[in-house]
Amino acid sequence: MTSKPRFVIALALAALVGGALVWMVFGGSLETYSSPGALVEGKTYRLNAIVTSGSPKDAAAEALTPAGLTFTVQDKDDASKRLPVVYHGIVPEQFKDGREIVVTGRYEKGTFVADRDKLVTKCPSKFQGKPSPSAT
């Protein structure tokens, strides 16, 4: 083989390995979030929603029961789209009514069944714009 075909093969292999590496590193973070109104039965999702009023007051104690923590979430843009969630695992300290959460799991029989320890709360102050100087 001459040097030009070897170079092309080596370049193609390097691109393939590089692409696989990028996919493994960033693949999970490139997944999009879904809202309660956009779920299809039997698929796995990263659900982004707001915890509705009436969630358990002592979430940490509730999470220790065999049935898990059960609460309802609503779409961030349409409060009429609600979905019950069943979660097992550690409940974040900031979990409460009205808090935005991201939870990973499957949509089954009208309920979102979360994966163990895959519940994250979003800090509202991080995602809100700073007030303009004229507003103060």
Image (cartoon, rainbow, N blue to C red):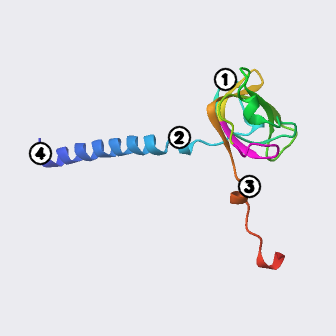
Please name which of the two marks, 3 or 2, marks the residue nearer to the observer: 3
Q: Nearer the viewer, residue 40 or 66?
A: 66
Amino acid type at mark 2? Gly
Q: Tell me the amino acid under the disc marked 3.
A: Pro
Residue depth check, mark 4 versus mark 2: number of the one nearer the observer: 2
Sequence-first tag of 3 and 1: 1
The local crowd at label 2, few if under 14, some if 14 to 19, many if 20 or more residues have their Cα within 10 Å, is: few
The answer to whether mark 3 and mark 1 are in CB contact below 8 A is no
Q: Which residue is mark 4?
A: 2
User: Would you identify the image quadrant in which residue 13 lies?
Assistant: top left
Q: Residue at x 74, y 40 (%)?
A: 35
- Of all residues shown, which one is farthest toward the left? 1
**N-term mark: 4 or 3:** 4
Q: Is residue 69 above or below residue 75?
A: above
Point out the image quarter for the N terminus: top left
In the image, which residues are magenta?
93-103
Kindly report the distance in space between the C-alpha atoms of the residues bearing marks 4 and 1: 53 Å
Label 1: which residue? 42
Task: Give the residue pinned by disc 2.
Answer: 28
Frontmost residue, 108 versus 72: 72
Q: Position of residue 119 (x, y in %)?
A: 66, 38
Vertical arrangement, residue 101 with respect to residue 134, above or below: above
Image mark for residue 124: 3
At 79% from the left and 46% from the top, the residue drawn is: 76
| Badge 4 vs badge 3, beta-carbon distance below 8 Å | no
